[in-house]
Image: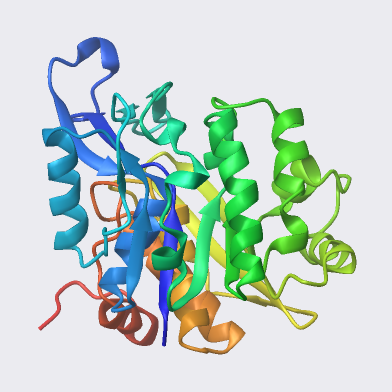
């Protein structure tokens, strides 16, 4: 079996403590995270050969990131060094009726200057089965938008499966521009993480349709897509949600059980779902097994502080088989 490669920006995350607001905070918890990095860490913890590609400044923070990634079993040999700064985001952790809030500080980051020619493509794609990307990357700069277009086409020419998570971020770019760019990737995608809102607003497929109607229409236009996946979240409060996962494969929609759970840290839940799905696809599981594993992985992540899902494949399988227990003996 080959490796799964993810490419994107990793940032320093600074979170308020004890559910404080920004204006109350004199100290912040520091973590590292970013959509594609979170997927890489999850996959490596599932025992899958995983490589992460990004660009980082040559300073002590980068050494800390290398330690974090390598400590979780992620290959880092093709990370590019250069540029001026590490992107940062600030997280005000909400509670009860107060939602969490994010402030980005990532303009002119090292990753936003990454050029396609800086990448060692022979090494990156050597023995690569799947390339995972997200819609965050082209939102960061013109250089990143060009990079995405070129690396998707390069991977496709080599027979690598393209996994793509739409991951629209309204604080990074307007919906009309995002729609134009992200929809252009659809003819190349094999594994697509997109829900009803993506179908309505990014793909412009109209409103008031069921998920299966959206998925059938997407596949009628883009038969190259082998898997369509998404989740449905019900928000009971900031601290308590329910989640159901969905996968559309071979004309049939499969759904997971619905989980109701308390939240320690919501950030990275979608990335954990993507990683769980990729783990199932990599291991040739059935569609039902894929969505069951991916949803349980996402639910588990909500109990883990930080961006990444620090959980093994066996722990997720235990939840699926035995449900939630109070003590593991």
The residue sitting at 14% across, 79% down in the picture is 328
Q: Nearer the viewer, residue 87 or 202?
A: 87
Residue 139, above or below 75: above
Give the x, y percent position of residue 141. Answer: 54, 29
Q: How is the image coloured?
A: rainbow
> Quarter of the image containing the N terminus?
bottom left
Left of 130 or right of it: where is 302? left
Q: Work out whether residue 231 can be spotted.
A: no
Q: Work out whether residue 25 can be spotted.
A: yes
The residue sitting at 42% across, 64% down in the picture is 124
Give the x, y percent position of residue 263. Answer: 33, 49
Give the x, y percent position of residue 86. Answer: 29, 30
Give the x, y percent position of residue 195. Answer: 67, 54
The residue sitting at 46% across, 60% down in the picture is 121
Residue 327, above or below 329: above
**Residue that sits furthest to the top in the current view:** 23
Q: Nearer the viewer, residue 253 or 59?
A: 59
Q: Quadrant of residue 231?
A: bottom right
Left of 266 or right of it: where is 70? left
Q: Quadrant of residue 329?
A: bottom left
Q: How many marks?
A: 0
Left of 53 or right of it: where is 326? left
Residue 88, above or below 65: above
Q: Quadrant of residue 209?
A: bottom right
The residue sitting at 19% across, 63% down in the picture is 72
């Amino acid at each position: 079996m080959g490796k799964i490669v993810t490419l994107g920006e990793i940032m320093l995350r600074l979170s308020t403590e004890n559910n404080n607001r920004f204006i109350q905070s004199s100290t912040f918890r520091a973590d590292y995270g970013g959509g594609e990095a979170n997927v890489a860490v999850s996959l490596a913890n599932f025992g899958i050969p995983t490589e992460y590609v990004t660009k980082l400044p040559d300073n002590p923070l980068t050494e800390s990131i290398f330690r974090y990634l390598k400590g979780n079993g992620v290959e880092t040999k093709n990370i590019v060094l250069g540029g001026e700064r590490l992107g940062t985001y600030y997280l005000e952790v909400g509670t009860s009726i107060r939602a969490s809030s994010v402030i980005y500080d990532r303009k002119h980051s090292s990753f936003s200057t990454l050029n396609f020619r800086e990448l060692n493509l022979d090494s990156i794609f050597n023995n690569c089965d799947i390339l995972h990307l997200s819609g965050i990357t082209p939102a960061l700069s013109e250089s990143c938008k060009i990079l995405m277009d070129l690396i998707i086409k390069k991977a496709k020419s080599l027979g690598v499966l393209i996994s793509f998570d739409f991951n629209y971020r309204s604080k990074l770019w307007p919906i009309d521009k995002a729609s134009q760019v992200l929809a252009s990737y659809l003819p190349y995608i094999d594994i697509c993480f997109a829900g009803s809102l993506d179908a309505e607003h990014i793909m412009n497929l109209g409103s008031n349709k069921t998920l299966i109607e959206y998925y059938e229409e997407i596949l009628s236009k883009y038969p190259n897509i082998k898997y369509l996946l998404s989740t449905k979240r019900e928000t009971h409060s900031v601290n308590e949600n329910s989640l159901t996962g969905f996968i559309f494969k071979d004309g049939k929609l499969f759904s997971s059980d619905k989980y109701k759970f308390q939240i320690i840290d919501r950030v990275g839940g979608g990335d954990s779902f993507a990683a769980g799905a990729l783990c199932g696809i990599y291991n040739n599981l059935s569609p039902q097994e894929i969505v069951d594993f991916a949803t349980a992985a996402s639910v588990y992540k909500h109990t883990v502080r930080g961006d990444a899902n620090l959980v093994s494949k066996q722990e997720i399988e235990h939840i699926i088989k035995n449900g939630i227990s109070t003590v593991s003996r």
